[in-house]
């Protein structure tokens, strides 16, 4: 229950000491409140500053990452371009190369009999290029048999020599493009 | 107690005059203790008609801040109950004045009317004649004695009892010809009754009847009471014994305070 203050006097007087104490109390409370407010504001500001610096560093990191990504994208584009150029060149090469070395060497191996040796061979890197070779055989009839197999391929005998132990011939043939 | 009461605490008087039915008593206070007490017989300060009382008192007063505590005789107490009290003080005053005009037979303008909010629904209204206040203030002004307090003894006693850890259910304040009973519940006054007291037996019977009335109407069972007696010739123990026969006990918790009706006195 609140105190019932009942004073009917017309000339009431304020208790200066109590009033001063109340004012002091209110002032101290206000001061304390202000101090708490300032402390809280400062703490909030510190927090904000820390958060801002964190955000700034995160933004810097993000910017770095973005730049790195851009660089990497540029590198990828450059690599892609180089790769595409290489691919285009390879495709060009593939397009230009319409014959098979292996099949020509296979043909040569099948055409040679057992006693024959291919001593030198040169191939031209183009379709229908001439194959120049130097072959040796222990017997002349083996050479003749070999000539016979090569006859369909525009055989051109450059020279033929008889050595002490074998016969040697330099010749060239032209094998048409296998794809045609 | 409003904010202004809190922010602007009133200075306590250095001497207090208790204005009884047929006597006045001057209390000189120092550091909230009574250092001098002087009873002046046949000096009725509260009676403007009795012109011989005041000079007897005035010649014994010092020109320091003074208070006058009137007993409950000139006051009119009313409890007014509403469904809901408005927060606005002005609105509440209008409401209380309107209600009071309906129940009070005299012209309210002639009375100083103060009221106190007791809870969400109840108001304690106190009326006292303006002419009495003007008379007292004029007498003090005439003698050049600063009068800073005019109060009521029952309210001072009530305020003091409300501070007790276990306040009594009611208190009885008796003077030569008047008696005032104030009942309280949960620290708020619930019923006030004033009556003219006669013999001790009549007084005890009247108190018993009032207790029974409160018991029947307020839903509480008053058992413990305090007795504050301003009379010199009558022993308060006799009245306490009479009331004890009706099951009412008087612990006299307030006996340690020499004059519980004097404001600011320990």
Image (cartoon, grey):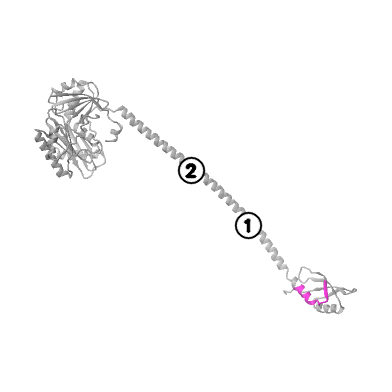
x and y percent of residue A44 in the render? 46, 42
Asked where in the image residue B87 lies, by quadrant, the reply is top left
Q: Secondary structure at mark 1?
A: helix
Nearer the viewer's eye, disc 1 or disc 2? Answer: 2
Answer whether residue B23 is visible to the viewer in this image.
Answer: yes
Which region of the structure is painted magenta?
A: A103-118
Q: Is residue A111 one of those drawn in magenta?
A: yes
Give B54 or B115, whichever is nearer the viewer: B54
Residue B106 can be seen in this image: no
Q: Secondary structure at mark 2?
A: helix
Q: Nearer the viewer, residue B144 or A35?
A: A35
How far apart marks 1 and 2 lie (CA) works out to 40 Å
Q: Position of residue B185 (x, y in %)?
A: 21, 41
Q: Residue at x 71, y 68 (%)?
A: A95
Q: Quadrant of the C terminus of chain B?
A: top left
Q: Position of residue B119 (x, y in %)?
A: 23, 41
Q: Which percent across, then down, holds residue B181? A: 16, 36
The local crowd at label 2, few if under 14, some if 14 to 19, many if 20 or more residues have their Cα within 10 Å, is few
Q: Answer with left or right where residue A148 lies relative to residue B68.
A: right
Chain letter of the residue beneath label 1 in the structure image: A
Q: Which residue is most to the top?
A: B59
Q: Which residue is mark 2?
A: A48
- Specify the subunit that label 2 lies on: A
Seen in the picture, residue A111 relative to B58 is either above or below; the reply is: below
Give the residue pinned by disc 1.
A76
Query: Can you say whether B260 is above or below A56 in the image?
Result: above
Q: Quadrant of residue B51?
A: top left
A73 sits to left or right of B147: right
Q: Is residue B127 magenta?
A: no
Q: State the quadrant of the N terminus of chain B.
A: top left
């Amino acid at each position: 229950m609140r105190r019932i203050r009942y004073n009917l006097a017309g000339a009431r007087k304020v208790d200066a000491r109590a009033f001063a104490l109340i004012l002091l109390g209110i002032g101290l409370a206000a001061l304390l409140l202000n101090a708490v407010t300032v402390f809280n504001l400062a703490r909030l500001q510190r927090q904000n500053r820390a958060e801002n610096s964190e955000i700034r560093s995160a933004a810097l990191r993000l910017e770095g990452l973005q730049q790195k990504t851009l660089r990497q994208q540029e590198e990828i584009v450059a690599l892609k371009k180089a790769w595409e150029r290489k691919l285009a060149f390879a495709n060009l090469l593939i397009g230009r190369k319409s014959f098979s070395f292996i099949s020509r060497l296979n043909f040569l191996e099948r055409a040679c009999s057992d006693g024959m040796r291919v001593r030198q061979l040169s191939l031209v890197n183009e379709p229908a290029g001439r194959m120049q070779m130097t072959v040796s055989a222990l017997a002349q009839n083996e050479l003749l048999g070999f000539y016979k197999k090569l006859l369909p391929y525009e055989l051109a005998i450059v020279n033929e020599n008889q050595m002490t132990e074998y016969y040697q011939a330099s010749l060239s043939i032209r094998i048409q493009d296998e794809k045609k | 107690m409003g904010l202004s009461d809190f922010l602007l605490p009133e200075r306590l008087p250095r001497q207090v005059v208790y204005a009884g039915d047929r006597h006045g008593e001057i209390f000189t206070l120092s550091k909230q203790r009574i250092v001098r007490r002087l009873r002046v017989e046949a000096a009725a300060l509260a009676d403007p008609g009795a012109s011989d009382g005041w000079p007897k008192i005035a010649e014994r007063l010092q020109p320091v801040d003074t208070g006058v505590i009137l007993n409950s005789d000139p006051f009119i107490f009313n409890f007014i109950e509403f469904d809901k009290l408005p927060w606005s003080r002005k609105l509440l005053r209008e409401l209380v004045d309107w209600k009071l005009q309906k129940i009070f037979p005299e012209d309210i303008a002639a009375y100083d009317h103060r009221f106190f909010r007791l809870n969400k629904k109840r108001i304690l209204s106190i009326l006292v004649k303006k002419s009495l206040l003007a008379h007292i203030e004029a007498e003090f002004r005439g003698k050049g004695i600063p009068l800073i307090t005019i109060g009521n003894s029952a309210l001072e006693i009530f305020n003091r009892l409300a501070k007790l850890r276990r306040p009594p259910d009611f208190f009885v304040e008796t003077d030569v010809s008047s008696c005032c009973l104030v009942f309280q519940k949960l620290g708020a006054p619930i019923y006030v009754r004033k009556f003219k007291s006669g013999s001790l037996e009549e007084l005890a019977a009247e108190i018993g009847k009032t207790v029974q009335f409160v018991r029947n109407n307020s839903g509480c069972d008053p058992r413990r009471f305090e007795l504050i007696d301003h009379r010199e010739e009558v022993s308060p123990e006799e009245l306490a014994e009479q009331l004890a026969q009706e099951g009412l006990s008087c612990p006299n918790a307030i006996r340690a305070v020499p004059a519980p009706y004097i404001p600011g006195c320990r």
